[in-house]
Image (spheres, rainbow, N blue to C red):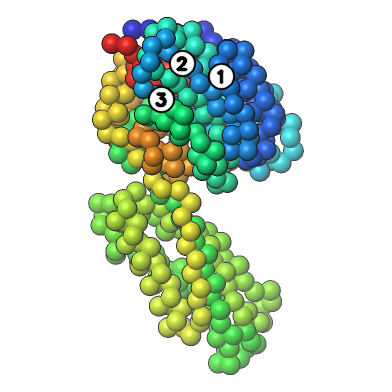
Amino acid sequence: MTDYLDEALELFEYTQELRRDFHRYPELGFQEIRTGGIVARELNTLGLEVTTGVGKTGVIALLEGKEPGPTALLRFDMDALPIHEETGAIYASQNPGLMHACGHDGHTAIGLTVARILQAHRDELAGTIKFVFQPAEEGLGGAEAMIKDGILENPRPDISLALHLWNEKPLGWIGAAGGPVMAAAEIFRIRVVGKGGHGAVPQLAIDPVLAAAQIITAVQSIVSRNVSPLQSAVVSVTTMRSGEAFNVIPPEVELQGTIRTFDPEVRQRVLERFNQVVSGVGGALECQVEVDVKSITPAVSNDPELATRFQKTIACLLPESKLITDYKTMGSEDMAFIMREIPGCFFFIGSANPEQGLDAAHHHPRFDFDERALSQGAAVMAAVASEYLSKE
Ligand SMILES: [Zn+2]
Ligand SMILES: [Zn+2]
């Protein structure tokens, strides 16, 4: 078997240089012009068939193996976040207020490295690799935009693969589970409308602040009382806006937050109870309540058979690593839209190094990771893709 880790390590300087370059010049979702340009340039250099402007700023490339066979879609996201970087790194962001704080700079560099590695092995591949460099993963709908532009056709992929560098876990840790690994996410907005008045004369007003407070408390009963203790769900109220003056009862309160679940039945039950509890509690306190719940992404669910197959590949590739086969997180990912159509696997590559201070959380202004995780990620993707397209 080819030692893909060795090959990825040989390309480490290439990967690191790309990652640091993307890190210096982060771009928000659907604005990845520079990033997408470099991606297209590198893929063209390899002689792949490249298409740009897919899903606005996305790039795809086809790598044909020597013999016909199935198609594997490999997806890498490219967008940054509206965060002011505080890492102090020599490769820190040169674009004020923008930062690669989720590791997508690393994902893009990994993707280009995988393309290099697999292009060198194309004679050993039976089938097609479809490289998908996706814009706007961070809640802006990049995956859906690319699907709309046809990435799931011509050829239609048989499997889909993606990864995330994962700072919750140290370098050397790999998560590759079967079944759901990231949650379905909804955003909710609630308007609690009462009747404003003088803070000293509450009997003439209808206080939406009190009603909102009761709603916030009551929705916490859903996870504890309506969901089995053996299943997972999150209801988080994360914003609360109302009022200007200490002596005025405001006319309304606005709440926002998120709901996370893995299981479709649990999701259904939580959403149903959420509407009942919010409307019921608000109504009991004489307020008008408007509830708006929107789905952001479905759950990311790994195909169990593919997961078992690739766990073996990864165990052979990285015998020293800590391979975890039941890891999941309540975070969400728009790769779910691709994996809803095409069975696949989503891997987590441990990237933290606490001794070097590289362990800030994703989306934190001091987020940074141990760059050795780049080679591990590239090796994993190259190995599982080539295993899937191997001629034997
Ligand atoms: Zn993120
Ligand atoms: Zn991310």
Viewer-proximal residue among 315 and 298? 298
The local secondary structure at tag 2 comes to strand
Q: Earlier in the sequence, mark 2 or mark 1?
A: 1
Residue drawn 51% across the image and 7% down it: 10
Residue in the picture at 38% in, 42% down: 340
Side of 126 where 352 appears, left or right: right
Q: Which residue is pictured at 45% across the width and 48% down the height?
A: 297
- The vertical placement of 382 against 308, above or below, is above
* In this rendering, the label closer to the viewer, 3 or 2: 2
Disc 1 marks a residue whose amino acid type is Glu
- Whether residue 344 is situated above or below residue 223 in the rendered picture: above
Mark pair 3, 2: CA separation: 11 Å
Neighbour class for label 2 at 10 Å: few (<14), some, many (≥20)?
many
> x%, y% of residue 251?
61, 80
**Amino acid type, mark 3:** Ala
First in sequence, mark 1 or 3: give its number. Answer: 1
